[in-house]
Image: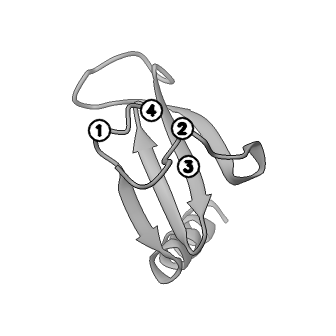
Amino acid sequence: MADGATLRARPANRRAIGVTCAVHRGPRGFANLVMERQGEEIIFDPHVTGECVIILDEDAAWVIRDALIEWLG
């Protein structure tokens, strides 16, 4: 687990989003996805368990941002 991922983050650096987990097939919004910024890394923690975190550097985060802007307008 990334150092402190989702456990000790300050509220300003942490967001929780209700999402759907395709593996667990719960209802829409059933799962939580926590996004946290630690320094220059963005951390995604599905299910808020710290067991499988996705860590992006700033360049990768910008790619996601640009894609979302393109898709959502």
Determine the CA span between mark 3 and mark 1: 14 Å
Sequence order check, earlier mark of 2 and 3: 2
Q: Nearer the viewer, residue 59 or 3?
A: 3
Per the image, the residue denoted by label 3 is: 35
Is the C terminus in the top left, top right, bottom left or bottom right quadrant? bottom right
Observer-side mark, 1 or 2, equals 2
Q: Relative to the observer, which residue lies in front, 6 or 26?
A: 6
Q: Earlier in the sequence, mark 3 or mark 1?
A: 3
- How far across and down, in percent of the image, does residue 26 sit? 35, 17
- Give how far across and how far down residue 1 sits, in percent: 34, 49
Circle 4 crowding by C-alpha within 10 Å: few under 14, some 14–19, many from 20:
some
Residue at (70% x, 53% y) in the render: 13
Where disc 3 sits, the SS reads strand
Label 2 and label 3: CA atoms lie apart by: 11 Å
Q: Nearer the viewer, mark 2 or mark 3?
A: 2
**Side (left or right) of 36 relative to 53:** right
Residue 48, numbered circle: 4
Label 3 CA crowd tier, 10 Å (few <14, some 14–19, many 20+)? many
Residue at numbered disc 2:
7
Q: Which residue is under mark 1?
A: 51
SS under mark 2: loop
